[in-house]
Image: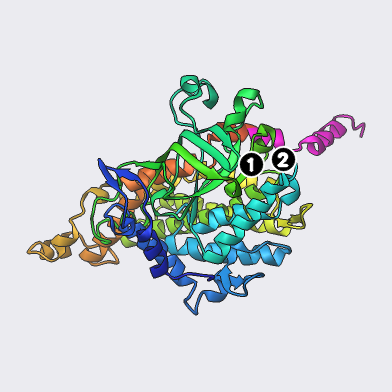
Amino acid sequence: MGIRSGTQYLDKLNSMRPHVVINGETVSENVADHPAFRNVARTYARLYDLQHDPDYTEQLTYVSPTSGDLVNASFLVPRTVADLQRRRAATSCWAEYSHGFLGRTGDYMNGCLTALSTAEKWFAQADPMFGENIRRFYEHCRENDLLTTHTLIPPQVNRSVAGSEQLGGQLSARITEERDDGIIINGARMLATIAPIADELLVFPSTLLRGTPEDAPYSYAFALPSDTEGLRYLCRTSLYNGGSTHDEPLASRFEEMDAVVVFDNVFVPNERVFMLGHPDLCNSFYSDTGAGALMTHQVVSRTIAKSEFFLGLASELSQSIGIDGFQHIQEDLAELIQTVEIGKALMRASEVDAQRNDDGVMLPKWTTLNAARNWYPKVAQRFPEIIRKFAASGLMALPGEADLASAALPDIELYLQAKTLTGPERVRLFKLAHDASISGFSGRQALYEYFFFGDPVRMAGALVKSYDTAPVQARVREFLNRSD
């Protein structure tokens, strides 16, 4: 089959029968047409359509090594630096379309699956079957252009104890039965972004396990169709309020739903199990397979696009109302420029210094990407702050689109005009600034970026532990011992 169209994606989504709960309603059919999911599903459909657009096909696809069909470039196994750059060009294309506001486009988990598909020797430490299973599943997703998402962590109930200890171990998703043909899962997990509109749910290791016998039931990796019997998705309230693309320009297009996943006696067949037991291997699932590196490579592409968006928005705002000549405004614009250029530099450095792993996969330099993923969540918190500073009370003086077609139009044209924009043009720009800085959508975006890879404090600790400071410490000691 190869790359699919947006219509094929939407038709497949509407043919599925998931159990999705949102605002007291259970949605079990035609998910792509439900008001809470319709717009973002069509945005994802547009990403699929871009693959068929002659202007983007070469950038977004490559020829499958098995079928000869065109498949998405995020499935390309990188063997050279040029391959890494080709993957980045594809992920940048999708990221620039959404300006980085879509955090779970298919290329994110595709990168993970691509790396895992090459790590058969690593999986063989547990069972050769697991490596074969993940390779077949990767090929299945590649050849059918499936959209996958994943669910990460135990429910947030009592973080002072491990997931295996919460309510006697009965809350977190766990293996409750091992059968000859597969396993049974019960419990819950957070936080499956886009689960209602995804084809497949990946349930992979996340929180570090202690390696005790009590952790064995929580040590696993597997995949399931999103409408598997016994799977339930509990969605948060939508942050899209039903407005037009004029009044809610970001939320109306990019409101990705987050959901808690409940496993109620869910059966996982053996061929879809990629790890079972082995807490120590689960703890190194991303680092030792290269999955973390390819996933982060995609993330940095996306965050560069988002940084560029905020630089563009801030520049438009400042010029439109004539504040671009003020030095305190220029200082903030300089900060955004620095963020864009640092992101690009980190990306380039990770590719230039890439090395092949033992499986012959060219991986971007992890220490550089690790620095990027620790740096960005904090600098990104400044984006909405800068927009609020530039737009100020203008964010609260915004009539709706309907007012532009009413008797209020002359007042809008006269009193809401800007230095470089008409009244209606200024309203449209400031609506975008509103959605990017003070709306519920923007609040979720800030939270999402801050905790994208987990608790920043724990991430910082992991960065320190993993970084080799011995060479620079040796230079300091050498200096202290100099006699001249």
Please say if 415 is above or below 160: below
Instruction: Give the image location of residue 231, x and y in percent.
Output: 42, 42
Please report contact status of discs 2 and 1: CB closer than 8 Å, yes or no.
Answer: yes
Q: Quadrant of residue 188?
A: top left
Quick one: SS at disc 2?
loop
- For disc 2, the marked residue is 126
- Quadrant position of the C terminus in the picture: top right
Whether residue 316 appears in this view of the structure is no
Q: Which mark is residue 262?
A: none
- For disc 1, the marked residue is 275
Mark-to-mark CA distance, 2 and 1: 7 Å
Total marks in image: 2
Q: Amino acid at mark 2?
A: Ala
Q: Image check: 181 left or right of 424?
A: right
Q: Nearer the viewer, residue 100 or 383?
A: 100
Q: Image check: 392 left or right of 201?
A: left
Instruction: Give the image location of residue 189, x and y in percent.
Output: 47, 36
Q: Nearer the viewer, residue 368 or 382?
A: 368
Instruction: Give the image location of residue 258, x and y in percent.
Output: 39, 44
Q: Is residue 200 magenta?
A: no
Instruction: Give the image location of residue 393, x and y in percent.
Output: 25, 47
Q: Which residues are magenta?
A: 462-484
Identify which residue is drawn at 41% across, 46% down: 445
Identify which residue is drawn at 90% across, 32% down: 482
**Does the magenta stretch mainly form a helix, a strand or a loop?**
helix
Identify which residue is drawn at 54% across, 58% down: 107
Q: Is residue 476 magenta?
A: yes
Quick one: SS at disc 1?
strand
